[in-house]
Image (cartoon, rainbow, N blue to C red):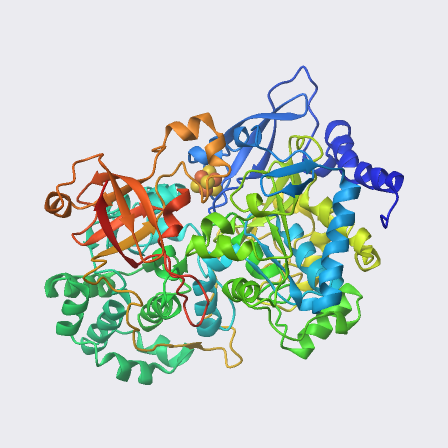
Amino acid sequence: MSIIDRSKLTSLIHQKEGHLTRELLLSPGGFGLGKVPDKNLPDAVTQMVCGFCGTGCNLNIHLKDGEGVCITPTTEYPVNLGMACPKGWEALSVLKSPDRAVSPLVKKSPSHWEPVDWDTALSLFTRKFKGIQQQYGPESVAFLSTGQMVTEEMAFLGALAKFGMGMIHGDGNTRQCMASAVTAYKQSFGFDAPPFTYQDLEESDVLVFVGANPCIAHPIMWERVMRNPHQPEIIVVDPRKTETAMQATQHLQIYPKSDLPLFYGIARILIEKDYLDKEYIQEHTEDFEAFAAHVKDYSIERVVTETGLSQAAIEHFAELIHSGKRVSFWWTMGVNQSYQGVRTAQSLINLALMTGNIGRPGTGPNSITGQCNAMGSRLFSNTTNLLGGHDFLDAEDRAKVAETLSIPVDRIPSENSWPYHKIIEGILSGKIKGLWVICTNPAHSWINQGQVRDILDRLDFLVVQDMYHTTETARHADLILPAAGWGEKEGTFINAERRIGRVKRVTRAPGQALSDFSIFKLIAQYWGCSEMFSEWKSPEDVFQIMKQLTVGQPCDISGIENYAAIEEQGGIQWPFPESETEPPDQQRRLFADGQFFHKNGRARFIFSDPTKMPEPPNEQYPFILLTGRGTASQWHTQTRTKNSDVLRKLYPERIYVEINPQDASHHSIKPNEWIFVESQRGRLRARAFVTQSVQPGQLFIPMHYEPTNQLTDAVFDPHSSQPSYKCCAVRILKN
Ligand code: SF4
C-alpha cells in the first residue's frame, strides 16, 4: 500500500516540476532566467555554467519560446573569457537522446524492465530499503553519488540519506578523482582549500604540470596558459608525451609513478643550493627540519635511477623553480589516481611552501578538479565531510549543524562513512544489502570492473537514479528512477578555483523524469521524514541553508545574498563571509596573509617514503598500462557525450591502445591492427595505435571505453582511498 495517495503525489509533482515550468515560461525573472522571451524574439539569452568539467565555463543559452536551442560561450565571464570546448558547445544536444529514462522502471527479469508510475516506484523504493534496514540494521543500505549534480541536490541527498533515512555509509564518485588532493590539502593546510584562481595561469612565469594534460582534459585552462604574456617556462612531468607535453618547454618523461622520488630529489637540490624562502618557512610552516632530513636520502643518482631522467634534466628543473619569480604547480589525475597520490600531492605542496610560491599571483600548489561540481561535493555532499566542511567525528560540529537544520543532534551519525571501496567490499561481505546509485556509473568506471559488476549483482536491491536507463550500472538495477540533467533543473556548481556559478532550467526533462531535487523531496514524503525538510522547498531555499551551514568555516559563503548576486558578480569564489562589505574581486586566491587553517596557523610539511608499485611488470605481464582521458570531446563513461552527433565525430569510435613503435615491431604489430590486451583480471580487444607518445614497455588506453577497467587493479591510496587507475601489469597478444 502506498504511503501517499496518488492525487497528493500528482499535486506534489505538479507543485515542483509544473511550478518550475510555469515559472520558466510565464514569470519574468523566475528562477534566474531573466526576462522570459517573447516567442517572436528567438535571440533571447540566459547564462549558466557548463555541466561537464570542473573548469566551470559560463555559457550563453539562446532561447526560443522559452526553450534553450543553442549555446555560445560567455565573453565577459572571468573563467572562460568567451571560449568553450566542444563539450560545452554541445551541452544541450546530449539531452535529446532516445536512451533518456522517461519513466520509472522496475526489473521483471534479468533483461526486462517495465515502466511504472512514480507512486509504484517510490512505494517499492521505501518498502525494500526499509525492509533491509529492519532486518540488517540502518547501515545495511548505502548510497553512491556524484560530482555532477548541483550542490543543493548533493546537500539534500546527503541530509536525506543520513539524517532522514538513517544511513551511515555514502560516498561519491569524487573518490575516483579528487580524494587524494582533498586529503593532501586537509593534512597540509588544515582544510580542503585549493588556493588558486585561474588568473594564476596567466601570471606565472614557471608553470609545472604533473600528471595533467590540460590541452585536452581542461582545454579552457590551457587557453589561459596560452594567454600568459610572460613567455613562461612550461614543465610537464608525465610518462606520456601528451598533447600538453608536446607544447612544453621541458618534458620530464619519467618512469610511471616515480614522481614522488623526483620531487623529493628536487627538494634536496633546493635545500643544498640554498634556494629557499627561509622567512616564509620560518613564519608560516612547521616540520621543515624533519622534511629536510627526510629528503637527504634522495640523491641525484637515486633520482636518476628511479625516474629514468638525466641528471642535467633534473638539475635544470630545479634551476627553473629557483629562477622563477612566480612558480605554480598544477596537478590532476596522474597524481591523484595513485597508490601514493596523497604524498605525491604533498610533495608538490612542500615545494611551493619551501620556495614561498603560495598566496601570491601566479603561484600555488594547485589541484585541478575533474567534474563540474567536484568542489561542491567536497563541501556539501555529507559523505566525507559533514555538511559545510564540518566533521562527523566532532561533537561541536554535529551540534552546530543540528541547530542550523533544527533537527535532533542524534540524527547525525557520529562516525565517518566507509569510503567507496569499503562500501563495495561491504556488499561482498554481506554487510551492505541495499544500494542507491545516483548520477554515476560504477559498472563502467570503477576499478577492476568485472569484480564490481559481480558484486552489484549480489545486492538484495539496487536503485539507479540517472538521466539514462542504458548505463552499464542501470543494467544491474532492480529499480531505475528517471532524472533530469544539467539544463533541466536549478542550482549551483562550484568550480576548481572555488567559484560558485549558476545552473538553470532551460528545457524540460523528457517524459516523467524529475529533477533529483524533486525526487529527494518525494522520497522524504514516502519515507515519512518530510517534516525534517519542510524548509527545503526549492534549490534556492537550500542555498540559503547552505550559507548558514558555512558560517565560521574556511568556506564561509554567508555573504552571498542570493542566486541573483552570483550572476551579477560573474560567479563568486569562496570564502565570502557576511563580514565582507565590498563586492568580491573576480580573482581571489587563498593564503595571501600566510595564515593556514591548522590551529597554529601554519602549513605542515608532510612526507613519507615511496611505496613499491603494487603490480610491477613481470615476465608474464611485461607492460605497464596507463589510462587517462582520450580527447576533449569525450567525457567519463560517455553516457552523455556519445549522444552528440558532433562529439562522436570528434573522437575515435572504437577502443584503441597506444604502443611504442619499438614494441610494435618486436611483436610484429602493424598500425590499426586489432590486438588483445590482458591483465590478471581481464582481457580486451583494441586497435593498435603505434606512436612515440608512450615509452617502450608502456601502453595507454583511454578510460572512456567500456572495457578499459576490465584490466585495472583494485589498489588504493592508504590515506585517501582513491583508486590507483594509472598503472598495472598487462601483456599483449596477437589477434
Ligand atoms: Fe565545459 Fe569544461 Fe569544456 Fe569549459 S572546458 S566548456 S567547463 S567541458
> Residue 231: x percent and y percent?
25, 47
> Residue 626: x percent and y percent?
29, 53
In this rendering, position of residue 253 left or right of residue 598: left
Q: Please identify the residue farthest to the front as the structure is shown.
A: 109
> Residue 203: x percent and y percent?
35, 52
Question: Residue at (18%, 54%) from the top-left corner?
Answer: 697
In this rendering, position of residue 641 left or right of residue 658: right
Classify 450 as above or below 349.
Answer: above
> Residue 494: x percent and y percent?
55, 51
Q: Give the quadrant of residue 529.
A: bottom right
Q: Quadrant of the C terminus?
A: top left
Foreground of the two, 39 or 241: 241
How many marks can you see? 0
Q: Please identify the residue farthest to the top as the structure is shown.
A: 40
Foreground of the two, 600 or 110: 110
Question: Residue at (32%, 85%) from the top-left corner?
Answer: 290
Foreground of the two, 632 or 106: 106
* Residue 392 visible in the displayed image: yes
* Residue 570 visible in the displayed image: no
Classify 67 as above or below 606.
Answer: above
